Image: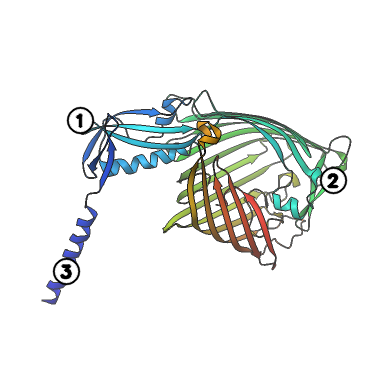
Amino acid sequence: MVRRAFAFSLILFVHTINCKAQTPVIYKVFTPAGDTILIDSMRSVIIDNFFVTGNKKTHEGYILRELSVKKGESFLFKDLRKLLDRDAQKIFNLRIFEESHTNVILKENDLVDIEVKVRERWYLWPIPIFRIADRNFNAWWSTRERDLSRLLYGVTLDHSNIRGRGERLRLTAQFGFTRNFQLFYSKPYIDKERKYGFAALFGFTEFKNLAYQSRNDEFDFLSIDKGLLREAYSAAVAFNYRPNFFTRHGLSLGYLHNNIADTIAVLNPEYLLDGRRKQQAFWVGYSVIYDNRDLVYYPLKGTYFSFVLNRTGMGIYNDVGIWSTEARFTKLFDLGKNFYYASHFQVNASAPFRQPFINQQRMGFFENFVRGYELSVVEGPIWLLNRNTIRKRLFKDAFRIRNFTKMDQFASLPLGLYLGAFIDIGWAEKYPNTDSRFNNTLLLGTGLGLDIVTFYDIVIRLEYSYNLEKETNFFLNVRAAI
């Protein structure tokens, strides 16, 4: 009798849960006249047509490529709405729109039209170059004593949506601590199905100031008034294949050429190995990326994975021969109540272990470091990194500023504030004939931070950290940590 009562209770419980799951939700939809009406979430609808509004420059086909639904398909409205919300996020992640939304317009006989509504960014930017030459702001501020002679200045002309198809052209002329001239062009799609893309890069750099060796986990620099310490030429082409919405494959081919002054070869014979003054090499690389995150510039939920394999030195020249690989995995969770957690894992490896100083792998650049060790350069043919952050969203809104700008591209100012706590772990193998207190030992840093997120993908991080060396520091960084 007890068993029967228990079984009956279990069946009743499951039935209750199932009924709750099937409880219809009411959504708002548009009519062809522009009015809004209510629709049951369990109602079946059929897609009749698509159209885009707000795209003054961008071609409609480039936007509709991101939709995961097709004409003639039938969906329960709740399922269709979920897919369209995700598609709007994918369109925003093209990074050429300030806003993207999808609307459903209900017509007769359960037919619906899908409207994609976008607000375009400002695409052509003459961007002044005025930044430091060091690997990050904190290294310049603390270890280089805010030396203004290490500034870079110039201009970059950047167009992120040439001809309205997401093509990008970037011209750079940089002077100051390092002279750099660069031309970059990319085209996301070169075929009718919009699966294959292409990119090319040409660059030339001159160095009057050069990091020629590392010591005590920092770089030693040499500066001269006349002549050059290093000249670098580079050229590369890349072919991309996007089989689905979230996966990309890439094949890259390139050439590099470095000339260094006799002084550098004498001060550090291992700069190009064995006292060489010239290095030439062709290289080839393969990459695969799976990116299913909500926002690419400041993700809060989703999954990211990438794998890269490169070979530098193809046998045509014997100046260098290196295999290198990198694997990254990031998982982000929405914990509810405006709390978010993210964990990032990264492995870098290269062989052989004896490599030219110029080609060595290092932690300490961009976001490839254990937070708390921003001031240190940690070199190693193999290194591991794990970064963990839990965030609480304090504020998120968009302020209408059209009355001040009179321009659609700057009609609103989005602002988000996130308070976070982090703990990072790292480890690096030692290169032969090098001496570092941070090799072959655990690196661990923890601390608190405040992230400021605003328009045009700008992220500013203010972080206070503590590491195993019992050092405390306050750091300023740009771009998301994970």
Query: Which residue corresponds to mark 2?
Result: 222
Q: CA distance from mark 3 to mark 2?
A: 80 Å
Query: Which element carries disc 2, helix, strand or loop?
Result: strand
Lateral position of residue 404 relative to residue 312, left or right? left
Q: Are marks 1 and 3 in contact (CB under 8 Å)?
A: no
Task: Say above or below: 108 vs 469.
Answer: above
Q: Earlier in the sequence, mark 3 or mark 2?
A: 3
Query: Which element carries disc 3, helix, strand or loop?
Result: helix
Q: Position of residue 334 (x, y in %)?
A: 43, 55
Q: Position of residue 98 (x, y in %)?
A: 49, 37
Q: Earlier in the sequence, mark 1 or mark 2?
A: 1
Q: Which mark, by number, is residue 108?
A: 1
Q: CA distance from mark 1 to mark 3?
A: 45 Å
Camera-side residue of 60 and 338: 338
Q: Quadrant of residue 181?
A: top right
Query: Which element carries disc 1, helix, strand or loop?
Result: helix
Q: Residue lying furthest bottom in this view?
A: 2
Q: Residue lying furthest left in this view?
A: 1
Q: Earlier in the sequence, mark 1 or mark 3?
A: 3
Query: Which residue corresponds to mark 3?
Result: 9
Lateral position of residue 14 relative to residue 113, left or right? left
Inspect this view and state whether residue 68 appears: no
In what quadrant of the picture does the N terminus appear? bottom left
Camera-side residue of 147 and 437: 147
Q: How many marks?
A: 3
Q: Position of residue 151 (x, y in %)?
A: 76, 42
Q: Residues within 10 Å of mark 3 (few under 14, many from 20)?
A: few
Task: Say above or below: 419 vs 355.
Answer: below
